[in-house]
């Protein structure tokens, strides 16, 4: 029995946070880092927004609903940016962000 509210949603969010952080780190190691600047910035923003959203959901905070909408917006933007790059880490991040956005949209 799971007693944590929003457990499945928080798991999706946590996966997105990890994917975004990994993608940002991997982008920094790419040969043409300048081409990855927008991707890195969105990865970091997305990871932070999602992390905060997950924390508030775990607390069952009344303010989590507001952040769910922002989470959808930033995840969609990050997925679109990462989806433009053929690197495996970018593609994996785009997928994680898309799944997170869908889960957050449903919960919002």
Image: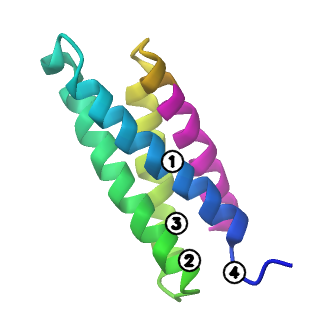
Residue topped by disc 2: 57
Circle 4/circle 2 CB separation < 8 Å: no
Could you classify mark 1 by the number of other residues whose Cα lies within 10 Å: few (under 14), some (14-19), or many (20 or more)? many
Discs 4/3, front? 4
Residue topped by disc 4: 4
Residue at mark 3 to residue at mark 2: CA–CA distance: 9 Å
Residue at mark 4 to residue at mark 2: CA–CA distance: 9 Å
Circle 4/circle 3 CB separation < 8 Å: no
Discs 3/1, front? 1
Tag 3, which secondary structure? helix
Discs 3/2, front? 2
Could you classify mark 4 by the number of other residues whose Cα lies within 10 Å: few (under 14), some (14-19), or many (20 or more)? few
Residue at mark 1 to residue at mark 2: CA–CA distance: 15 Å
Name the N-terminal-most of marks 4 and 1: 4
Note whether residue 77 is visible: no
Horizontal side, residue 5 vs residue 65: left or right: right
Q: Could you tell me which quadrant the C terminus lies in?
A: bottom right
How far across and how far down the image is residue 33, in percent?
Answer: 16, 19
Circle 3/circle 1 CB separation < 8 Å: no
Tag 4, which secondary structure? loop
How far across and how far down the image is residue 66, in percent?
Answer: 47, 74
Name the N-terminal-most of marks 3 and 1: 1
How far across and how far down the image is residue 92, in percent?
Answer: 53, 28
Front residue of 76/5: it is: 5
Residue topped by disc 3: 68
Residue at mark 4 to residue at mark 3: CA–CA distance: 17 Å
Q: Is residue 6 above or below residue 73?
A: below
Tag 2, which secondary structure? helix
């Amino acid at each position: 029995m799971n007693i944590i509210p929003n457990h499945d949603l928080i798991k999706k969010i946590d996966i997105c946070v990890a994917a975004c952080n990994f993608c940002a780190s991997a982008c920094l190691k790419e040969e043409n880092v300048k081409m990855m600047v927008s991707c890195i910035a969105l990865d970091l923003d997305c990871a932070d927004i999602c992390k905060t959203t997950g924390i508030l959901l775990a607390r069952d905070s009344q303010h989590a609903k507001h952040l769910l909408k922002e989470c959808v917006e930033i995840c969609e933007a990050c997925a679109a940016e990462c989806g433009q790059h053929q690197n495996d880490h970018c593609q994996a991040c785009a997928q994680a962000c898309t799944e997170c956005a869908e889960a957050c949209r449903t919960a919002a």
